[in-house]
Amino acid sequence: MSAAKNAQTSRNNAPEEYDLVIIGSGAGAKLIAWTFAGRGHRVAVVERKYVGGACPNIACLPSKNVIHTAQVASYVRRSGEFGIARDGFRVDMSAVRDRKRKMVAGLVETHLDEFRHSGTELIMGTGRFAGLRTVEVTLNDGGQRLLRGTNVVIGTGTHAAVDSTPGLAEAQPLTHIEALELDEVPERLLVMGGGYIGLEFAQAMRRFGSNVTVIDRNGRLLHREDDDVTEAMHQLFEDEGIQTALHARIKRVSGKSGDSVKVVIEQNGVEKTLEGTHLLVATGRIPNTKDLGLELAGVEVTDRGYVKVNERLQTTAPGVWAVGEVAGSPQYTHISEDDFRVFADNVTGGNHVTTGRLVPFCLYTDPELARVGLSEKEARARGVRYRLFKAPMAAVLRARALMETRGFLKALVATDSDRILGFTGCGTGAGEVMSAVQIAMVGGLPYTALRDTAIAHPTLVEGLHSLFITPPVLSSEMKDERAATLQSA
């Protein structure tokens, strides 16, 4: 838009009309933009900073780039196991960072090409509602624009939480954004949070050579997962020399990350002081809804600050939708992409809902953790009866060939049918194996279809043969019932 037109719009205060105005350019938002612009709709996307959203810039893909480099470092350190002699070994974090930056630059350029080729108008600036379906944009290069859409989509995502612990903000801790920009290996890294982000970075930095301690308020890492999963994670970290401080309540922080920092924790009523050179905060996410002017558009938020939506992703304001993390959807890129499908169907007259969808996830430690469907904890909490199939990764011949036999595969199967209820993989390539199971679950295939299919040898997915030929174990509830029946007989 020319400066003259911009000035004229400001004087007339008349909004520019669009079929679709989108605030944010993350996973679901950009797919909506490219799809509808490609169909001939007039679409504007307002993006404050990261073209394409967090995933290609500061989250999923950059972190996996760095994690892969850390895995290479681990292989080099273990090269003697492979019969490869080495002399000397050091990690150049500036080179690690530059490799990541190169990948990000390529991804951003790819996104810019998609916006151009689709006909989407990408507007770099900060958007906020000025009224119903009306968005005021403060442009990054100066000036303002007023946009009105037949439909408006909110896709502003979330950001890392830095809580009110005394001294924490003053310590200027790393979040995942700053951790991906490190040009030195932290000598002693303290990680606040035993969730996905904290654990991935903890292992990567340890493999680069840092002394790492993970602090978590719960008694187990990944405490919501099944006990065998948390035990495997604890053993992995112990094997790699990563320290853990569990059942820890953080009382105060002092110093400055990057120099010297102290974290005072309380465990079982006893205070302890942990010292480090760097502090990484990975304790949760906060929705980006502040200063969006949602009240001016009639858009309500939940008690946690997420945009309130129904199962069709409609907000409380007509013609206004929300997708991805800001809408309270599970915080995965692939779910934001699925939100695109929900929106695209519903805005064109369909009836597509978010309820009941399978939500897979991967934790990219090495080895990986991957799960889809019910865990044993969830099944027991819901009173769901199941048969448990479980096999060690040592039973997977490809894992044997790679000599990566840590972990296991397990699946929950219904007792009244052969329907798969859930799958968990803790081992090398677990995410790829999980995807094969998920496709079977979506297609309604019984577990016997995977058991009896000729799968290429030797592959990791072939491990499903080993998994499903093992005799199943009944859930504890079924065992109790069977014991009671035998006793009464």
Image (tube, helix red, strand yellow):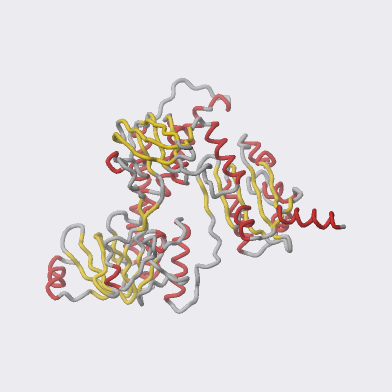
The percent position of residue 261, horizontal first and vertical second, equals 33, 33
Res 203 visible: no
The answer to which of 267 and 373 lies nearer the viewer is 267
Res 283 visible: yes
The correct choice, above or below, for 152 with respect to 272 in the image is below
The correct choice, above or below, for 108 with respect to 65 in the image is below
Q: Within the image, what quadrant is residue 65 found in?
A: top left
Q: Residue furthest front?
A: 269
| Position of the N terminus by quadrant | bottom left
Q: Residue at x 34, y 52 (%)?
A: 108
Q: Residue at x 34, y 47 (%)?
A: 162
The answer to which of 464 and 312 lies nearer the viewer is 312
Q: Residue furthest bottom?
A: 349
The percent position of residue 192, horizontal first and vertical second, equals 41, 41
| Position of the C terminus by quadrant | bottom right
Q: Is residue 183 left or right of residue 194?
A: left
Q: Residue at x 29, y 39 (%)?
A: 171
Q: Residue at x 59, y 40 (%)?
A: 231
Q: Within the image, what quadrant is residue 381 found in?
A: bottom right
The correct choice, above or below, for 77 with respect to 305 in the image is above
The percent position of residue 158, horizontal first and vertical second, equals 37, 56
Q: Residue furthest right?
A: 489
The percent position of residue 374, horizontal first and vertical second, equals 60, 57
The answer to which of 272 and 93 lies nearer the viewer is 272
The correct choice, above or below, for 438 with respect to 165 in the image is below
